[in-house]
Amino acid sequence: MAQFGSWVLVALSVLSWGVQFGFLGVHDGSKHQAAFALSILSALGYQGCQSFWTAMFPRLARNLPKTRAAEEKMLNGSISESEYHKVDSYYRNKITNYSLAFSMLGFTLVSAISVGILKSLDSTANQANNNWAMSVCIMFATVWWMVFGIPWFFAEKKRVNEKLPEGVSYLSLPFKQLGYAFKSFSKLKQTALYLFSYWMLGDGLNTAISLQSTIQNEVISYDMVTSMYLNMINGGTNILGTILFWWFQKTFKVSTRNMYIICSVFITLFPIYGLIGTWTNKIGFHNIWEVWFYNAYFGIFIGPYYAYSSTMMSEVCPRGKEFVFFAIFSTINKTSSFIGPFVSSAIIDDTGNNNSGFSFLVALCCVSLASSFFLNEDNARVQAEEFLLEEKKRIANGESLVF
């Protein structure tokens, strides 16, 4: 819906802020149903906003002066199309990595200030203090988002928006767009393959994170102050990891696809390590030092995945269709924890060992890793261009397209 007006991003942002302020009135067990509803609405609002932000990065990169200059050189025959695409890909990766680094800087600062809030409200004294302190932390994080989010509404360049197709409402439009996009996968095979790989990897990673968090909370005895310290370690090392991965990519001119594969390898090692804890208590997230080590490892070696998976989506997405395909990309990110939790829970119930649940997650990550080797950025580009040319022909013949 983004191409039909910027009001959608504003509405989703306001929804998220309002819902998160609602947590100030929900801080005891008797209101758990309201807390559950607020959590769902908050997640929907935030994920919707994130879809718009990430879909905007490819367009920002392609409109940078150096990228536009490279495009002019390509059109004049001064450089090849392949050389232009390398410049385009370079700046898409740069913007995405910079964005991740700055977002993690904000995450780390908010976590650090939240530690002060938790301590000032004596969150460790009792459950009531802990719940209220967490509500105040959520309020603070929301205000932080508003301070940095509202200026964009005024700074954003106004663009000519598309008109809503006849016979289509804002309620039916997203479903029609998604239906059209899924039908397009028969022609956009590389796009479909990447989304499959991303779905499998996301299912394995997200479920592994949830499983590790369960074990971690038991190890730290659900201490929220310690949890915030761990968030700071995670965020700080994520900044370091993003810088290191970006340096590696620039220095050795590694493609986005290969950076995605490298990230996938490090992600796969995560559930493998957790699985080892099935047979021994020496390692496998049983000790306090492993909790700190895990958060540092996650930040340095897994954190950059969130940048490269997004850039890889832009590599296989038809130009001009970013908002629709990134919406699918973001939806998969949130719904990918679908198969993993069910199967892992069944394994844990059968064995009585939390670490045994990592076994299925290793399999999911391995399937994703294997499929990612069949990704080809050049083939994806050709398929996307053919798809767009076919669309132009259909429009010229008077056919109505949803997007």
Image (cartoon, rainbow, N blue to C red):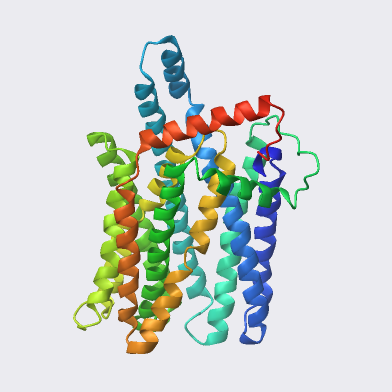
Q: Is residue 111 above or below residue 166?
A: below
Q: Quadrant of residue 234?
A: bottom left
**Can you see residue 54?**
yes
Quadrant in the picture for the N terminus: top right
Quadrant in the picture for the C terminus: top right
Q: Is residue 208 above or below residue 27?
A: above
The answer to which of 60 and 177 lies nearer the viewer is: 177
Residue pictured at 81% horizontal, 43% vertical = 167
Residue pictured at 30% horizontal, 55% vertical = 369
The answer to which of 140 and 258 lies nearer the viewer is: 258
- Percent position of residue 397, x then y: 68, 26
Specify whether 369 is left or right of 388. left
- Percent position of residue 109, x then y: 45, 57
In the image as oriented, which residue stretches furthest toward the right? 167
Counting the numbered discs, the total is 0
Specify whether 392 is left or right of 190. right
Q: Quadrant of residue 226?
A: bottom left
- Percent position of residue 143, x then y: 61, 57
The answer to which of 293 and 256 lies nearer the viewer is: 256
Residue pictured at 34% horizontal, 22% vertical = 83
